[in-house]
Image (cartoon, rainbow, N blue to C red):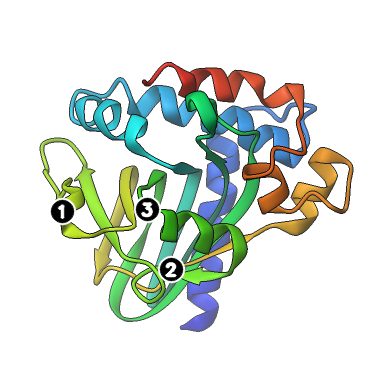
């Protein structure tokens, strides 16, 4: 069963790359940046999401965008994906991106596969510093509330819930079974070092101290700057 789950997960991943179209001469980091732009534009123009996102993005202290969170399983399951995180600084300006991964594993009655695009709005200082400085688990170190998920389905969108993170996602495919909890968010050190060509390019140095910049991410920052 574990072998089947691994096969299904690999097949989903391969399918995502096929769906994404012909390969371009982009680094892994730049491809994530470009796909993050597409995710933002897609989600902020959807009828069921745009009002919520345009309301809460200006309130967010940071944002983590995962263009392809891949979920699959048969009894044993898992999900994972890479993305970019930016923080809002003085004057509402967005930082340059740091690279992160999110993943989880599960066991239970479940079958299928799904590819989701996800935006996670970080609402609290605790949420922001926890993700920047540590490897964190959702539901343990941080609390998350779910925003609208799918056409016509409303979720909790009030900061009165005490959530550190507000999540929004759209998905392709069907996944039957219990939701995966305990997803772990972790920095991708190698991608950060390579993108800024410096081994001192830590998430804190990039996101809070503003010590690093890469003009190739300026369009991503500009897209987020529209929401004030």
Residue 6, which numbered label?
A: none
**Residue receiving disc 1:** 160
Q: Which quarter of the figure has residue 59?
A: top left
Question: Dot 1, crowdedness within 10 Å: few (<14), some or many (≥20)?
Answer: few
| Left or right for 216, reference 44 | right
Q: Is residue 222 above or below residue 208?
A: above
Quick check: marks 3 and 1 in contact, CB under 8 Å?
no
Q: In this view, does 100 lie above or below 40?
A: below
Residue in the foreground of this view, choosing between 185 and 151: 185
Residue 183, which numbered label?
A: 2
Q: How far apart are marks 1 and 2 (CA)?
A: 23 Å
In primary-sequence order, the first of circles 3 and 1 is: 3
Q: In front of the other: label 1 or label 2? A: 1
Instruction: Point out residue 174 in the picture as x, y percentages from the top left corner.
Output: 28, 53
Residue in the foreground of this view, choosing between 176 and 130: 130
Residue 124, which numbered label?
A: 3
Q: Which quarter of the figure has residue 117?
A: top left
In primary-sequence order, the first of circles 3 and 2 is: 3
Residue in the foreground of this view, choosing between 9 and 191: 191
| Left or right for 190, reference 114 | right
Q: Is residue 67 visible?
A: yes
Q: In front of the other: label 3 or label 2? A: 3
């Amino acid at each position: 069963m574990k072998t089947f789950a691994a096969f299904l997960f690999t097949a989903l991943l391969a399918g995502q790359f096929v769906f994404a179209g012909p390969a371009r001469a982009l680094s892994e980091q730049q491809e994530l940046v470009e796909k993050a732009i597409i995710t933002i534009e897609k989600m902020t123009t959807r009828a069921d999401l745009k009002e919520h996102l345009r309301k809460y993005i200006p309130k967010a202290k940071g944002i983590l965008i995962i263009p392809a969170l891949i979920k699959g399983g048969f009894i044993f399951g898992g999900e994972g994906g890479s993305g970019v995180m930016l923080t809002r600084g003085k004057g509402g300006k967005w930082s340059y991106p740091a690279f992160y991964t999110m993943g989880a594993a599960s066991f239970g009655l479940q079958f299928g596969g799904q590819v989701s695009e996800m935006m996670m709005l970080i609402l609290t200082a605790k949420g922001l510093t926890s993700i920047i400085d540590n490897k964190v688990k959702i539901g343990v170190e941080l609390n998350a509330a779910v925003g609208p998920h799918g056409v016509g389905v409303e979720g909790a969108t009030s900061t009165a819930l005490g959530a550190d993170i507000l999540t929004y996602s759209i998905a392709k495919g069907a996944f039957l079974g219990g939701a995966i909890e305990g997803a772990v968010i972790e920095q991708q050190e190698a991608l950060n070092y390579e993108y800024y060509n410096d081994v001192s390019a830590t998430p804190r140095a990039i996101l809070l101290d503003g010590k690093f910049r890469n003009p190739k991410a300026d369009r991503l920052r500009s897209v987020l700057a529209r929401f004030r």
